């Protein structure tokens, strides 16, 4: 099995190293990751800047690695052109949860989503914390990955895994839906060395919506949350209503 690994925390991310170290037990591992921190880059790609690719040494036996001067999605696209084929793509392990609406902003999730669009079965992994014991999290999730790797992945679909920081349930996992949460947006005003005003975003979580199968609740209960995902944004029910309402009015 040929496995591609990427992330959004950068090539030096501790979560990426921990993931690569367990992935070598599953097959041949190739790492292609951003050369710096790219969190919250979502599904962005670099179309107006040069992309540089450099082979680097992660000092993990048997793992070949490249750093790319772009986004997580750039990394996956480049790898699928220059290093393919792949049987599985793993993204992470991200420092911090990617639950509920977090998936809209996450470069970790986007990298897995791009691999799915490229026809590669893919899994995004995130560690809820702090603390961030990536080695322990990787060992806990390995049995889950071995199980999921044997599953057939539907076209354009991928999995989003969130690992609790506490080991209360070990490697037990729960199949979940995306939860819902809202944030109170805030911008801290600061001043740079030149006297120019700038802002830092800080979002405070103010509400969560739970259900029997929501990812946020599963993690809080100590389970590894596994959420099936796909890039299908059409609102089917509304599509039907609009079709009936607007097209019938034109008749």
Image (tube, grey):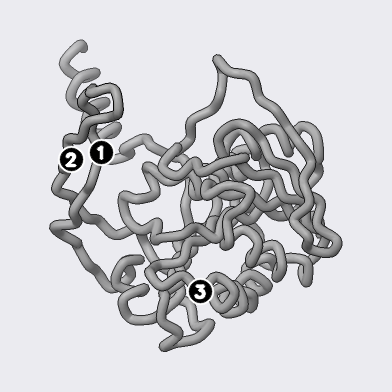
Residue drawn where x is 14% and y is 57% of the image: 206
User: CA gap, disc 3 to disc 1?
Assistant: 27 Å
Q: Do the residues labelled 3 and 1 touch (CB within 8 Å)?
A: no
Q: In this view, does 27 lie to the left or right of 163?
A: right
Q: Are marks 2 and 1 in contact (CB under 8 Å)?
A: yes
- For marks 3 and 1, give the one nearer the viewer: 1
What is the x, y in percent for residue 237? 27, 40
Residue 71 position by quadrant: top right
Give the number of the disc on residue 223: none
- For marks 3 and 2, give the one nearer the viewer: 2
Residue at the disc numbered 3: 133
Q: In which quarter of the image is the C terminus?
A: top left
Residue drawn where x is 81% and y is 51% of the image: 64
Q: Earlier in the sequence, mark 3 or mark 1?
A: 3
Which type of secondary structure does the marked residue at label 2 adopt? Answer: strand
User: CA gap, disc 2 to disc 1?
Assistant: 5 Å
Q: Quadrant of the N terminus?
A: bottom right
Residue at the disc numbered 1: 200
Give the number of the disc on residue 188: 2
């Amino acid at each position: 099995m040929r496995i591609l690994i990427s992330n959004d925390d950068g090539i030096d991310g501790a979560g990426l190293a921990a993931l690569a170290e367990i992935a070598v037990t599953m097959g041949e591992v190739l790492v292609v990751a951003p050369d710096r921190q790219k969190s919250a880059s979502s599904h962005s790609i670099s179309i107006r800047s040069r992309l540089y690719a450099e082979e680097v040494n992660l000092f993990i036996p048997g793992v070949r690695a490249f750093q790319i001067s772009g986004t997580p999605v750039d990394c996956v696209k480049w790898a699928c052109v220059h290093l393919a084929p792949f049987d599985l793509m793993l993204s992470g392990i991200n420092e911090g949860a990617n639950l509920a609406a977090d998936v809209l902003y996450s470069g970790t999730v986007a990298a897995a989503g791009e691999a799915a669009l490229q026809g590669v079965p893919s899994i995004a992994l995130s560690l809820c914390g702090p603390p961030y014991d990536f080695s322990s999290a990787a060992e806990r999730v390995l049995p889950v990955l071995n199980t999921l790797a044997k599953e057939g992945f539907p076209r354009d679909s991928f999995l989003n895994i969130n690992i609790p920081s506490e080991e209360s349930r070990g490697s037990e996992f729960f199949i979940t839906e995306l939860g819902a949460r809202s944030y109170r947006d805030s911008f801290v005003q600061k001043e740079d060395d030149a006297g120019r005003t700038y802002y830092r975003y800080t979002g405070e979580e103010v509400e969560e919506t739970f259900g029997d199968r929501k990812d946020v609740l599963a993690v809080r209960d100590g389970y590894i949350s596994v959420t099936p995902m796909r890039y299908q944004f059409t609102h089917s029910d509304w599509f039907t209503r609009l079709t009936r309402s607007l097209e019938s009015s034109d008749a």
